[in-house]
Image (cartoon, rainbow, N blue to C red):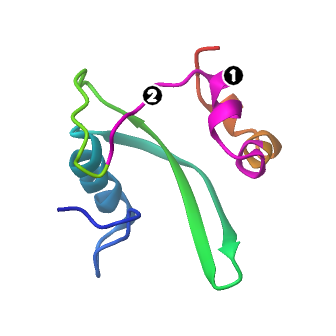
Amino acid sequence: MGDRGGQLHFGEELEEALIREAREEVGIKVQIDELLFANTFFTDPHRQVILLMYLCRTKDHQVNLSEEHSEYKWATRSELYHYLPYAITSDLEKYKVFEKIKLID
């Protein structure tokens, strides 16, 4: 069973953790192309989160959610503004992340 919140296993490389989490949480095998963006923010005064956004690809067409999840959605670029917090989308625009990848509008 996977770790809650996408935590790293001790000694695990970042990319290994991403591949493992994709397999455990949504049942797909991903190929990592590149790190697109990294940032950190506080969810409360005692909890700091690090956000790492990678460009990944998969040949898998079937998503198989783990028991931790009940639904998923493939989102277009314009839909991301609805689903992601403003703080994240504004940073993605500021650092031109959307320009690095091809997303469907």
Considering every residue shown, the one lying at the far front of the view is 70
How dense is the environment of label 1, judged by Cα within 10 Å: few (below 14), some, or many (20 and up)? few
Image mark for residue 78 = 1
The quarter of the rendered structure image containing the C terminus is top right
In the rendered view, would you say 24 is above or below 42?
Answer: above
- State the extent of the magenta-drawn residues as a range: 69-89
Q: Is residue 79 magenta?
A: yes
Residue drawn where x is 35% and y is 71% of the image: 8
Viewer-closest of 67 and 11 = 67
Front one among 95 and 46: 46
Q: Is residue 62 magenta?
A: no
Depth check: give the residue in front, 44 or 58. 44
Q: Residue furthest bottom?
A: 46
Residue sitting at 69 percent across and 72 percent down?
42
Q: Position of residue 78 (x, y in %)?
A: 69, 22
- Depth check, front residue: 92 or 25: 25
Could you tell me the amino acid type at mark 1? Ser
Q: Secondary structure at mark 1?
A: helix
Mark 2 highlights which residue? 73
Mark 2 vs 1, N-terminal side: 2
Q: How many marks?
A: 2
Q: Secondary structure at mark 2?
A: loop
Q: Residue at x 17, y 62 (%)?
A: 1
The relative height of residue 96 versus residue 20 in the rendered view (above or below) is above
Q: Give me the C-alpha separation between circle 2 and circle 1.
A: 13 Å
